[in-house]
């Protein structure tokens, strides 16, 4: 079961990067100890093997094939997901506005990406999920003089060929995708930050058809930037919502693949937003969000019906979660010591791991120089991939920035 999370702040979405990264440990303000991830790739021998064999750590490496002119979104620098065969799939956007896919196992330095979209419109905000035998990539695209819409493309041959882009819904953005077994689910918003709705759809594993979009929020305000997770027939959709004035995070659960939904749950306090969610196969659910420049994580052991007290794990923005089947998790985000998510000062990509029992590990900095958040995906054998972008020296206020994609393989707590 893999989960990929997607979106963040509406007016800060498109930023890009440049220069190579350096690696250092973080003396975290939350009293977390530092971890070194600069050692060369080597087998630790302490991670349980799955059907594809145990992974090994891979030191931070540049995805050379992406070049240094990738047009990569501010809060979705690049996305990565692991399929059931143990292959990692990457998606990013080029400087010429083309959605690209690449795949690898172990090191990703030699990924050879291929085009998924035609680049006819302004493309941003990518999403990716891998079900049994199917890879689904989604993105937001705005044609000249037209509205913003969400599109999908699928591959049934590991990414060698892709279906023509299909419109999921017009007037939409902020797509999130997740997969469990042979099912892919999607959540997104329609509208803008004045009036919007959270919509959901699922892909039938037999026919390949998508259900008609259904609304899952109950707000009369502006619910935005959903994230979706799936495990078996259970689905979770979370989003931020300002129905009470300031933003809170809400969650809805389904145990029948999205046919019916539980009542909305308000799971966070005032001035929080851009949540991410993932779930194990054992009722353990993790939810994280940012708010007031802090990254906060919550854990549930009853499928998301209730959550333990929140824990602040770092400073920054745009968290991304992924869970092992046993409920262990990895959480990546954009580390920042300041309150301005568009500032370049002291901004890095970082991650933390946590065990199903609620134990949170040390924070690790993936890049010391200015960069975007880390997309993360578990491999299912105690290891996870992290993908981020270094944009040191770039002016985040520019309409488009150039940059480099980076990747590392790290261990997950409890693995």
Image: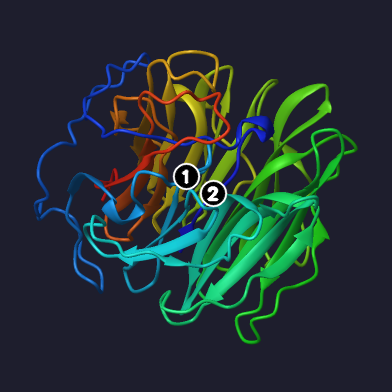
| Label 2 with label 1: CB-CB less than 8 Å | yes
Residue lying at 39% horizontally and 39% vertically, measured from the top left = 403
The answer to whether residue 379 of the structure is visible from this angle is yes
Query: Which mark identifies residue 321?
Result: 1
Q: Nearer the viewer, residue 414 or 172?
A: 172
Q: In the rendered view, does 10 fall on the left or right side of 127?
A: right
Residue lying at 41% horizontally and 15% vertically, measured from the top left = 345
In the displayed structure, would residue 156 be above or below residue 147? below
Query: Which mark identifies residue 5?
Result: 2
Viewport quadrant of the N terminus: bottom left
The answer to whether residue 258 of the structure is visible from this angle is no
For label 2, the SS is loop
In the displayed structure, would residue 132 be above or below residue 236? below
For disc 2, the neighbor class at 10 Å (few under 14, some 14 to 19, many from 20) is many
Residue lying at 47% horizontally and 44% vertically, measured from the top left = 321
The mark nearer the N terminus, 2 or 1, is: 2
Query: Which mark identifies residue 332?
Result: none
Residue at mark 2 to residue at mark 1: CA–CA distance = 7 Å
Q: Nearer the viewer, residue 130 or 269?
A: 130
Nearer mark to the viewer, of 2 and 1: 2
In the displayed structure, would residue 195 be above or below residue 43? above
Q: How many marks?
A: 2
Which residue is farthest bottom? 207
State the image coordinates of residue 316 (x, y, percent, origin top left).
47, 24
Q: How is the model colour-coded?
A: rainbow
Which residue is farthest right? 220
């Amino acid at each position: 079961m893999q989960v990929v999370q997607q979106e963040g702040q509406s007016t800060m979405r498109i930023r890009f990067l440049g220069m190579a990264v350096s690696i250092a440990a973080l003396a975290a303000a939350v009293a977390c100890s530092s971890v070194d991830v600069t050692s060369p790739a080597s087998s630790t021998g302490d991670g349980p093997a799955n059907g594809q064999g145990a992974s090994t750590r891979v030191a931070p490496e540049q995805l050379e094939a992406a070049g240094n002119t990738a047009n990569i979104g501010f809060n979705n620098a690049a996305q990565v997901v692991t399929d059931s065969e143990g292959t990692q799939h990457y998606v990013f956007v080029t400087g010429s506005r083309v959605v690209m896919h690449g795949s690898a196992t172990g090191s990703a330095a030699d990924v050879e990406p291929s085009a998924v979209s035609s680049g006819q419109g302004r493309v941003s905000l990518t999403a990716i999920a891998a079900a049994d035998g199917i890879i689904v990539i989604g993105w937001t695209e705005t044609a000249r003089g037209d509205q913003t819409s969400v599109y999908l493309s699928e591959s049934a041959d590991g990414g060698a060929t892709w279906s023509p882009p299909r419109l999921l819904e017009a007037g939409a953005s902020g797509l999130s995708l997740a997969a469990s077994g042979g099912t892919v689910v999607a959540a997104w918003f329609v509208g803008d930050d004045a009036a919007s709705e959270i919509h959901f759809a699922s892909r039938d594993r037999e026919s390949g058809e998508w259900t008609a979009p259904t609304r899952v929020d109950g707000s009369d305000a502006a619910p935005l930037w959903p994230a979706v997770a799936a495990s078996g027939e259970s689905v979770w959709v979370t989003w931020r919502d300002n129905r009470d004035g300031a933003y809170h995070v809400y969650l809805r659960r389904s145990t029948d693949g999205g046919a019916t939904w539980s009542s909305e749950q308000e799971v966070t306090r005032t001035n929080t937003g851009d949540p991410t969610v993932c779930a194990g196969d054992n009722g353990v659910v993790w939810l994280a969000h940012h708010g007031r420049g802090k990254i906060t994580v919550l854990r549930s052991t009853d499928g998301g019906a209730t959550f333990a007290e929140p824990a602040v794990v770092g400073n920054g923005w745009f968290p991304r979660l992924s869970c092992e089947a046993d409920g262990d998790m990895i959480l990546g985000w954009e580390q920042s010591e300041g309150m301005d998510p568009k500032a370049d000062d002291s901004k890095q990509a970082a991650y933390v791991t946590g065990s199903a029992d609620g134990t949170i590990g040390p924070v690790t900095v993936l890049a010391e120089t200015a960069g975007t958040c880390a997309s993360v995906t578990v491999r299912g054998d105690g290891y996870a991939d992290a993908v981020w972008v270094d944009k040191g020296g770039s002016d985040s206020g520019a309409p488009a920035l150039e940059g480099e994609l980076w990747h590392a393989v790290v261990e997950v707590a409890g693995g």
